[in-house]
Image: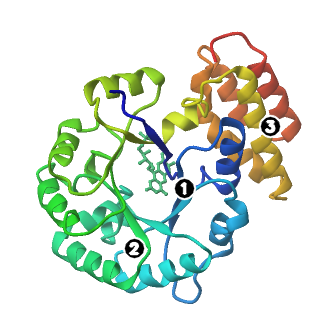
């Protein structure tokens, strides 16, 4: 029997902003969940202005949004969890995946995986301290894939909403292939629901994944959706992409960020989106150089009206 598949939009700091999430949901229909890029606890206030904009319920209307927390301090996590609950959130995600060296060096993100005893204690405290649903997004270890066995035993002690696994080590960053045999280990041993994340960039990749793991039913996708926001949508025409682009650009312009900031945001996206336009890499270069919104629109129009497969 064909299993029903569930898809989540991965959190991507600076890119999957509330404007992006809403534009995606509006044009391509909402995915099951949209993860909000990480929030960190602060000493003096719960949220910075930029963070507040991300989590406001009116900025996440019509989608199931899951805020993510990056910390190794249970008190900070719980404080932030309470604040998020007061905004109506029922579920939060813990970031145990961020590979950034500065983050990991502070024992946060995938750096926390190096200290399983402390992690266990942290989880004990947060599960005792909140009734919110908690999911975890994790890498498989810091330096060695063998670390995952112990981590999995720890995760198994807690009633996670789900365990999202990006089967790379902190030291892998984004290099090499995801270690899918380690994911299989999680499949065999996890007591918690699982979701796979990593390097599914095209429909072919997704198809091949399900051929390899027919029983998997939940995928989180990040860069693949940045490259092709219609990746999971039946109608993935050039027109749809045009609509998405217009919707997102209008949303950023409406934010009054100033043209430079709007252009920065849009240019960052094109590093991914250009993959939909094989042979047009030159336009990506042009886009990187434009200084004005009018020039930007012109180059984008050339791209959108060019031939080639969408
Ligand atoms: C620019 C960028 C920003 C990211 N920001 C976050 C983040 O805030 N929180 C997080 O858990 N993962 C973050 N990630 C990791 C992604 O959520 C995802 O796990 C990773 O890209 C692998 O999935 P993919 O191969 O489908 O892209 C980020 C990745 C990228 C490329």
Query: Mark 1: is the Cβ under 8 angstroms from ligand 1?
Result: yes
Choose the circle earlier in sequence order: 1 or 3. 1
| SS state under label 2 | loop
Farthest right residue in view? 294
Q: Find out whether the residues at labels 1 and 3 contact each other: C-beta distance under 8 Å.
A: no
Question: Percent x, y for residue 221?
Answer: 46, 41
Choose the circle earlier in sequence order: 3 or 2. 2
Give the number of the disc on residue 71: 2
Marks 1 and 3, how far apart at CA: 21 Å
- Residue at 66% in and 28% down: 285
Give the number of the disc on residue 13: 1
- Quarter of the picture containing the C terminus is top right
Instruction: Examine the rendered structure and indicate whether residue 152 appears above or below residue 43.
Output: above
- Residue at 14% in and 62% down: 153
Q: Find out whether the residues at labels 1 and 2 contact each other: C-beta distance under 8 Å.
A: no
The residue to which callout 3 is attached is: 246
- Residue at 27% in and 31% down: 213
Instruction: Examine the rendered structure and indicate whether residue 203 appears above or below residue 271.
Output: above
Marks 1 and 2, how far apart at CA: 15 Å
Q: Which image quadrant for residue 231?
A: top right
């Amino acid at each position: 029997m064909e299993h029903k598949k569930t898809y989540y939009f991965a959190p991507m700091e600076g890119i999957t902003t509330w404007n992006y999430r809403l534009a995606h949901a509006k044009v391509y229909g909402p995915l099951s969940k949209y993860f909000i890029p990480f929030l960190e606890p602060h000493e003096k206030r719960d949220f910075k202005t930029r963070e507040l904009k991300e989590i406001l319920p009116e900025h996440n209307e019509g989608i199931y949004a899951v805020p993510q927390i990056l910390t190794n301090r249970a008190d900070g996590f719980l404080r932030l969890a309470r604040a998020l609950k007061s905004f109506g959130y029922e579920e939060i995600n813990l970031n145990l995946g961020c590979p950034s060296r500065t983050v990991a060096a502070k024992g946060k993100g995938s750096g926390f995986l190096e200290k399983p005893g402390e992690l266990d204690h942290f989880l004990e405290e947060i599960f005792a301290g909140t009734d919110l649903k908690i999911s975890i997004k994790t890498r498989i270890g810091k330096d060695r894939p063998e670390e995952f066995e112990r981590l999995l035993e720890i995760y198994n002690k807690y009633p996670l909403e789900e365990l999202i696994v990006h089967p790379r080590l902190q030291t892998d960053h984004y290099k090499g292939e995801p270690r899918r045999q380690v994911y299989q280990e999680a499949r065999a041993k996890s007591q918690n629901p699982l979701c796979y994340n990593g390097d599914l960039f095209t429909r072919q990749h997704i198809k091949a994944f399900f051929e390899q793991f027919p029983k998997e039913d939940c995928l989180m996708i990040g860069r693949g959706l940045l490259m092709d926001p219609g990746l999971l949508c039946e109608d993935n025409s050039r027109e749809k992409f045009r609509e998405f682009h217009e919707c997102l650009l209008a949303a950023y312009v409406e934010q009054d960020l100033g043209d430079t900031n709007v252009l920065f945001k849009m240019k960052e996206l094109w590093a991914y989106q250009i993959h939909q336009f094989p042979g047009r890499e030159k336009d990506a270069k042009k886009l990187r150089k434009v200084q004005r919104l009018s020039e930007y629109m012109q180059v984008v129009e050339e791209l959108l009206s060019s031939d080639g497969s969408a």
